[in-house]
Image (spheres, rainbow, N blue to C red):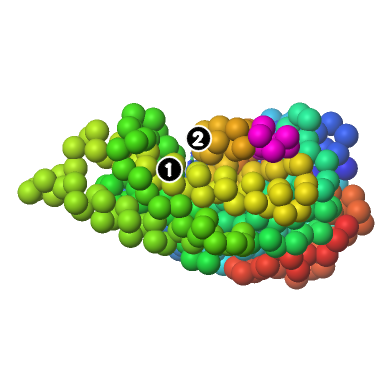
Amino acid sequence: MRVLGIETSCDETGVAVYDSDQGLLADALYSQVAMHTEYGGVVPELASRDHVRKLIPLIREVLADAKLELADLDAVAFTAGPGLIGALMVGAATGRALALGLGIPAMAVHHMEGHLLAPMLEENPPAFPFVALLVSGGHTQLVRVDAIGQYELLGESLDDAAGEAFDKAAKMLGLEYPGGPLIAKLAEQGDRTRFRFPRPMTDRPGLDFSFSGLKTFTLNTADSCRDKDGVIDPQTMADIAAAFEDAVVDTLAIKCRRALRETGLKQLIIAGGVSANRRLRERLEEMVGAEKAQLYYARPRFCTDNGAMIAYAGCQRLLAGQQSDLTILAKPRWPMATLPPL
Ligand code: KG4
Ligand code: ZN
């Protein structure tokens, strides 16, 4: 089965074609980051309008890359939520209409299920069951995954998501949006022993997270290091970035270890934008090594938003005989645990 995947939930337009026999045939991404940087974050109305401009040309590009015509498609999968309502509507309306026009099935895909399954696009994918750490700009969740659609939420952030915390800490240091990759880059030059930031909620039981206190801690540390003109010297900036990154990474690693021990599972997958973080991958490799477990993740390009994960997730549900009705479905909020099993 050959599925066109469309992702427009936030600030990237992603399109891909996945073939259940041949694997990924083509994928293309247009990032709106440059447009939103000026405003220090995503402006929803600008995001929707830009998806309208970029989506159809991107679909054409992907089909040409894969040397396919529209008539060669067997189904269309689109992100239906969670995300920005206007942005979601562009992909959902386009995807649904395209499928109707071609007389083929359509599948409304959950964005986080897409992220969760992205490591399946790599060689040696994990087998069910496993523990998944989903860390993106909007979500921080630990999930027990027994099969596609069989999700048990083990813990989640009570306030900011991990990616959101990275972005806010970056803003405090005067870095551009999105700050995650910039903090990570700055941290490489940092002295990781100069500051010690708290590891929130690790000293009590449970698998929930909280990152808002870390944000305040970062702000206070940054303010205490400013000179009379409000400037922080470059080395101190790097030292703060390193301390912040280590605090987030350590906190995530402690909770992941706890989740593996509590479930007795020996496989951990990490997905979502923050799973591209190198320090996190290294720290988790160390942890799973000690636990005699395995770590799985996608290539960095498929950690952040992309069309390939949506095409793949949609294809798995379509192969199981599921499909969406004619409703143009766009749900800004959509708990993953409400998804049906295959
Ligand atoms: O999954 P994603 O592309 O979009 C959402 O679904 O939210 O995740 C974006 C988030 C942003 O907060 C971004 O700062 C963060 O992922 N991110 C990173 C890195 N790359 C992206 N955070 C830390 N280190 C990175 N290398
Ligand atoms: Zn995402």
Q: Does residue 287 appear in the picture of this structure?
A: yes
Ligand 1 within 8 Å of disc 2? The answer is yes
Q: Nearer the viewer, residue 29 or 231?
A: 231
Left-right relation of 179 to 321: left
Please, is residue 220 above or below residue 266 in the view? below
Tag of residue 279 = 2
**Crowdedness near tag 2: few (<14), some (14–19) or many (≥20) residues, C-alpha within 10 Å:** some
The residue sitting at the left extreme is 228
Specify whether residue 9 is painted magenta. Answer: no
Left-right relation of 169 to 311: left
Ligand 1 within 8 Å of disc 1? The answer is yes
Q: Position of residue 179 (x, y in %)?
A: 40, 46
The residue sitting at the right extreme is 321
Q: Quadrant of residue 90?
A: bottom right
Q: Which residue is mark 1?
A: 245
Q: Position of residue 239 (x, y in %)?
A: 30, 37
Residue plotted at (37% across, 57% down) = 215
Q: Does residue 315 appear in the picture of this structure?
A: no
Instruction: State the SS at label 1.
Output: helix
| Alpha-carbon span between mark 1 and mark 2 | 8 Å
Q: Residue type at mark 2: give it.
A: Arg
The total number of labels drawn is 2
**Crowdedness near tag 1: few (<14), some (14–19) or many (≥20) residues, C-alpha within 10 Å:** many
Q: Nearer the viewer, residue 15 or 129?
A: 129
Q: Position of residue 256 (x, y in %)?
A: 63, 48
Instruction: State the SS at label 2.
Output: helix
Q: Quadrant of residue 42?
A: bottom left
Magenta range is: 288-298
Q: Earlier in the sequence, mark 1 or mark 2?
A: 1
